[in-house]
């Protein structure tokens, strides 16, 4: 598996975790997903597409 697919999978898991009923866990997961997407220069629409899968 290439690095991009690994990153996409990680962001997808973090976005799923961002829907946790635990507010602190959800906020931290969303912050981490945003940080990864920014460091990879992924667009907002790209992150939304990953979350939709």
Image (spheres, rainbow, N blue to C red):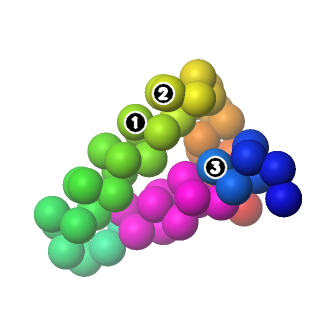
Residue 52 seen from this side:
no
Are the residues at dot 1 and dot 2 in contact (C-beta closer than 8 Å)?
A: yes
The residue at the point 28 percent across, 63 percent down is 26
Question: Between residues 8 and 18, which one lies in front from this camera angle?
Answer: 8
Q: Is residue 39 above or below residue 11?
A: above
Element on which disc 2 rests: helix
Vertical relation: 52 (above or below) 25:
above
Q: Name the residue under label 1.
A: 35
Q: Which of 33 and 3 is in front in this view?
A: 3
Mark 1 and mark 2: Cα distance apart in space = 5 Å
* Mark 3 crowdedness (10 Å alpha carbons): few <14, some 14-19, many ≥20: some
Sooner in the amino-acid sequence: mark 1 or mark 3: 3
Residue farthest bottom in this picture: 21
Answer left or right for 20 relative to 46: left
Residue closer to the observer: 18 or 8? 8
Crowding around mark 1 (Cα neighbors within 10 Å: few <14, some 14 to 19, many 20+) is few
| Quadrant the N terminus occupies | bottom right
Q: Vertical placement of 1 versus 30: above or below?
A: below
Q: Which residue is drawn at 40% across and 68% down?
A: 17
Query: Does residue 13 show up magenta in the picture?
Result: yes
Label 3 sits on residue: 7
Q: Mark 2 points at which residue?
A: 38
Q: For residue 1, which numbered disc appears in the image? A: none
Q: Which stretch is magenta?
A: 8-18
Could you tell me which residue is drawn at 49 percent across and 27 percent down?
39
């Amino acid at each position: 598996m290439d690095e991009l697919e690994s990153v996409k999978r990680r962001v997808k898991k973090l976005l799923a975790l961002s829907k946790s009923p635990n507010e602190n866990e959800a906020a931290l997961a969303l912050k981490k997903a945003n940080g990864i997407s920014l460091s990879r220069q992924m667009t907002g629409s790209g992150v939304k597409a990953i979350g939709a899968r």
